[in-house]
Image (cartoon, grey):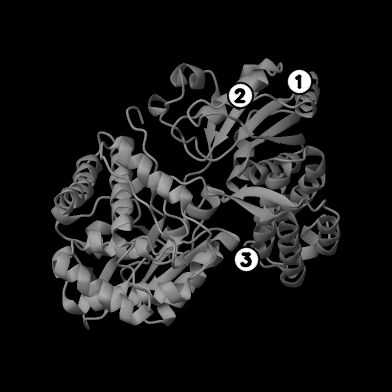
Amino acid sequence: MSGLNLLVFRAGRRRVSGQKLKTALIGRLQRLDAERTYEAVLDALLLAGELECGVADVDAKAACSCELLNDQIAEILLRVATGTSSRANPSFLNLCSTDPENLIDAARVIPSLTQLTISTPEGFAYYALHPLAYADVIWQIPACEHLLVVGIRSIGTTLSAVAAAAARSRGITAERITVRPQGHPYNRSLEFTGEQLAAVGKAVSCGSSFIVVDEGPGLSGSSFLAVAEALERAGAPTEKIVLVSSHAPNIDALCATDAVRRWQRCTCIAVAAEARRPARAVNFIGGGHWRSHMIGNEGEWPASWTSLERLKYVSPTDHDARRFFKFAGLGHYGDVVFERERKVAAAGFAPMPVMESDSFVSYPWISARPLSARNLSPEVLVRLAEYCAFRMRTFSLELSDLTVLQEMANHNLRELGLDCTVELRLERPVIADGKMQPHEWLVSTEGKLVKTDSGSHGDDHFFPGPTDIAWDLAGAIVEWQMNDEQIAEFLDTYHRASGDDARARINDFTRAYAVFRSAYCLMAANAMSGSDEQPRLHRAANGYRAVLDKMKARSMVAV
């Protein structure tokens, strides 16, 4: 990403009560004891991974009990997944080395730390990365008798537990540690603690092999490289270090210092690219391919950062009831997305979702066409306003300020050479929709206006995160290219429907929205350099920039 210093990804780290997180895990384990299904095991594993990660970041000794519990749940998941194809087995206990009641007892004795910092594992929540993929890859590493698995936190807590369990099932003596490299995202470094150095030294003396597990690599690859080089400094032979990633990297594009030479010294194995999905999710339409199914004229395709889209499929065309499938998120990450979309559908704004296997959600395939800004009419404008009013009422939350969002907007304004700032006022905090573009609205053959993709984008790893409903109001204004008269009518209609007068704060949110979208498209274009998508993304970035330039010119005239 050379030459760009723009903010589009939010940190996503949040402070939580350690006691509340432990209580939630106990609840998941009680559900596991009652249901005894594959899905219940998986959800317990994901939450145990969150707890272990949060505790390990502040107290390595306290994390030991978390690690043991996580290892036990990982072993159960592996046994259940390989012991039955149906993933719901009446002989559940026969597949487990530990009774679920014992897991509950083990969770209760985990030290309750007051505050923990945790983050959502992106692969589990957004990109259909399944922890069992890291069990499958164990069969690809060179034969060995001893193995040390090094998980890169955050997601590496769960991945390392599953990889170590899989190694033991293969007859390998396996131990694991988790680490958190520090420093700039493009230049991470790692220094082992004394306990970790002892574990690595023991593994070296046993002639162990080493695998490093994480999702990614991301833009730089520096986290993987930092761990590999820390292992080498601790005495691990380079030829015995294997990096296990979620995808095969384009090492020429990695932006860590001297990335190509450093990466080529390592052995890297990528997990299987094919995601677990429902049997009827056959035809892939993710990665921007949905546009060819919905929008005939390629010149009208909206820009997309296609590699970061959620997985999407449709059932075969010859099926009586064609369905659209989208990955929602593993376990509780997907549950919250499904619940939002269920509420949107119940209010009549969207098709009713159905929870499917493998953390996918399906929807009826609608014979409809996406709208464009030229379709804005008084009826559409009312529908947009009513939808924003609905979200304001239904997805309200407690939020104290918008400091991080404001810092993002002002940083990007400076980086794009725009001599202005925003001051965001928080009056109606919500989980926003985040995708108010015209193509996200379909008009059916009966003329009904339907919202798509309403559950995930307002709280994913991009900005805005939890924000004021004015973000969606601004999004609608920008994306539908409203003129002054339409803006006034839109905000007035929203005011009547919600009781919220957003006029005093809308201009700052409009600037914040437009500069975020411009930065997003520029980052995406850079990441997709040389592809057919790059010019489309540049055009979109220029369109958002034009909105900002117009607002600046008008403010200067007003002064």
Quarter of the image for residue 382 reads bottom left
Task: Provide residue 162's location: percent of width, then percent of height.
Answer: 68, 45
Please report whichever mark, 2 or 1, sits nearer to the chain's N-terminal start: 1
Residue displayed at 32% across by 55% down: 508
Q: Residues within 10 Å of mark 1 (few under 14, many from 20)?
A: many
Which residue does the numbered mark 3 point to in the structure image? 86
Quarter of the image for residue 224 reads top right
Kindly identify the amino acid type of the residue bearing the numbered disc 3.
Ser
Residue displayed at 44% across by 66% down: 427
Q: Nearer the viewer, residue 86 or 156?
A: 156
Secondary structure beneath dot 2 equals helix
Residue displayed at 53% across by 59% down: 400
Please report whichever mark, 3 or 1, sits nearer to the chain's N-terminal start: 3
Decide: is 16 above or below 34. Answer: above
Task: Provide residue 123's location: percent of width, then percent of height.
Answer: 52, 48
Which residue does the numbered mark 1 point to in the structure image? 204
Q: In this image, 153 relative to 11: left or right?
A: right
Which residue does the numbered mark 2 point to in the structure image? 228
